[in-house]
Amino acid sequence: MDKMELSMKAFFLFAGLLLWAGIWLTGFDVVHWVLYLPASFFLFSALTGICPGMIFFKEVFQEEKPD
């Protein structure tokens, strides 16, 4: 049920871990709660292969296919 390539999963995993490392180094009680959203979504996308943001924007910017 994977919806993305392994390279994209690796990118999301690296970006998510980097965000979580930044949150940890800054302090969990100091950072704004909004920063937890992309960090969590990146890890969710890496683990499941489903990226809600990509699905949404593919639907919004859908190109018409010529017949």
Image (cartoon, rainbow, N blue to C red):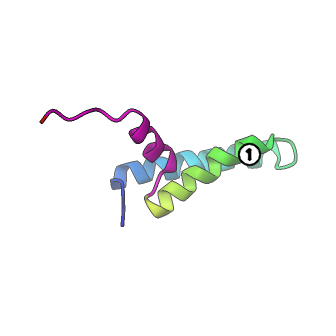
**How far across and how far down the image is residue 26, in percent?**
79, 42
Front residue of this view, candidates 5 and 27: 5
23 sits left or right of 49 in the view: right
- Left or right for 2, reference 30: left
Quadrant containing the C terminus in the rendered view? top left
Q: Does 31 sit above or below residue 4?
A: above
Indicate left or right for 35 with 42 as reference. right
Q: Look at 20% across and 35% down and name the residue there.
A: 65
Residue range in magenta is 50-66
Reply above or below: 3 against 64.
Answer: below
The picture places residue 28, in percent across and down from the top left corner, at: 82, 50
Of the 4 image quadrants, the one containing the N terminus is bottom left
Which residue is the extreme one toward the bottom?
1
Which residue carries the number 1 mark? 23
**Could you say where residue 10 lies in the image, as x and y percent from the top left?**
43, 52
Q: Is residue 52 magenta?
A: yes
Where residue 29 appears, as percent x and y from the top left, is 87, 48
Point out the residue furthest to the left here. 67
The image quadrant of residue 15 is top right
Residue appearing at x 35%, y 55% in the figure: 6
Residue placed furthest toward the right: 29
Residue drawn at 43 percent across, 47 percent down:
55
Q: Amino acid at mark 1?
A: Ile
